[in-house]
Image (spheres, helix red, strand yellow):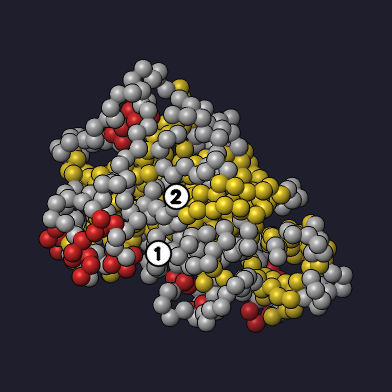
Amino acid sequence: MTHPTDLSTRDAQRTGPALGRSLGPCLDRRRLIGGAAAGAALALLPGRADAQAAAPALPAAGSPFSDATVPDLARALGNRAFVAQAANDMPDPLKNLSREAYEAIRLRPEALLWGGEPHGFAVEPLVRGFYYTDRVALFLVEDGVVRPVTYARGNYEAGSEAGAAALPETDPGFSGLRIRARFGERHQDFAVFQGACFYRLVGQGQEFGVNGRALMLRPADPRGEEFPRWRALFVERPKTPDGPLVIHALIDSDSLAAALRLELRPGETSTATVTATLVTRKAVEHLGLGGMQAPFLFGPHDRRGADDARAAVYAAGGLQIRNGGGEAIWRPVRNPETLQISGFLDNGPQGFGLIQRDRSPAIFEDDTHRWERCPSLWVEPGESAGADNLWGEGAVTLLEIPSDAEINENVIAYWRPKAALPAGQEIRVGYRQNWGGEPPVGPLARVTSTRSGRGGANPRRLFLVDFTGDLLFTPEGTMVPVETVLIAGPGRIVEGATRWIAHPETRTVRVAFELDPGSERAVELRLALKTEGRQITETWLYRWTP
């Protein structure tokens, strides 16, 4: 399930430039449910004399296929006026299925496409139903030619009486696909492409959590977010038993058309190498690259409104950034009372992602959903390539949206290039995604816990931040001399309340301090530890709001 958000109204609130931007209360919010590294270059497209012509036809069965096929389709689409697909042609019985009944519909194991082949991948076409109303054309590419995927009622197990009654004999259309893959000696669900242009992968032994977004247009914009959508997915049969699975995706939206080539490799950390060709119909002022979203309901430092027997509920605990200057940043995420938008200005970021660092079931105490098994998603941009490089100047952008249910993916991160994209342009950009464990922070001590609670007097707040790493201790187990770099803006750090607590057995130093926000409604905090003038920890950033 995905819950993209259209935030049509908000008030802006500026905070310190070193710590990012904040946008204040969300006055109106409605939820819509949707389901290689290279630099960027621009090239002027041909004129649009045929703008009103019919959309180009998708390849017929037996048509030759190459890496140019889907980019050519995107160019043909982008040179024509956008035509939205019908949204009301799904049979009511499918549309009215509950989420549980819809998710119980599965392809029979013996009907999996390519099931049992040496490469270890199997494809499961997903029928439309529930909120997944978009019709997505599915194709297999075998021996260089296209084979459309067709529907057969007998290939599906309904899973419930409601599903059995809803599944029609005639083709209802597909909404996407699920991929199974071999991990070592066993097979498991590996990837899902479904809903708007959402997709998700897992590493070995993990369960689905964070969602990737192929493209984002105007997220949290007062004009409303624009949601690009899958139109066709072409899945290439791997040529060797240990080869990657390559998926070519055609995307369409009011402002642009796009082609994505995704090279997927399962593993302990699964990877996706993404190359995108964007064809703009209109000027794009607010583009999101490498987008991702995950639920954060409550955790140790933020239990707002949490009348819940579980200890914590989240698929990602924070935003990790390695900026262009090499600084390692950890920003715990929250479920705030009002919409919060943070922009971390950068030039040539080395990587960013929504990260699940907490891997112990005891952190969550959830017997139903294994949050500790959710993957982290880390994006590594392509190399810089000239003045028009989309991975040059810009900002890692974080949206934190109020939520009252764990199904809402209310934490969103993406890269926003500073430059707008003109209309009538073709843009190529690439990046690599790592789905699995958290990325390393180098020799630095990393943040392993953030906790917050009532301070010594109202409205003061007590913070406990744990840093863990060998740099914090001598080989004999003595804590090295440290200097605390602690900044609040606005607000103030309570004098005399900051202290260190060393735990040599776990190589952890806890920093305890109190914040006095006064009458402020938002305070940015920055914390790091140094020894002999050299920073030896990640930079911990945090936005406190009431």
Q: Position of residue 280 (x, y in %)?
A: 45, 30
- Left or right for 347, reference 497: left
Quadrant housing residue 333 = bottom right
Residue appearing at x 81%, y 62% in the figure = 519
Q: Which amino acid type is marked by label 2? A: Arg
Nearest to the observer: residue 154 or residue 541 = 154
Nearest to the observer: residue 412 or residue 10 = 10
Q: Position of residue 410 (x, y in %)?
A: 52, 59
Nearest to the observer: residue 205 or residue 514 = 514
Q: Position of residue 181 (x, y in %)?
A: 29, 61
Q: Label 2: few (<14), some or many (≥20) within 10 Å?
A: many
Label 1 sits on residue: 208
Quadrant housing residue 231 = top left
Measured Cα–Cα span from mark 2 to mark 1: 14 Å
Nearest to the observer: residue 226 or residue 89 = 89
Instruction: Please say if 442 is above or below 170.
Output: below
Residues at circles 2 and 1 in contact by the CB criterion of under 8 Å: no
Instruction: Please say if 132 is above or below 500.
Output: above
Q: Which amino acid type is marked by label 1? A: Phe
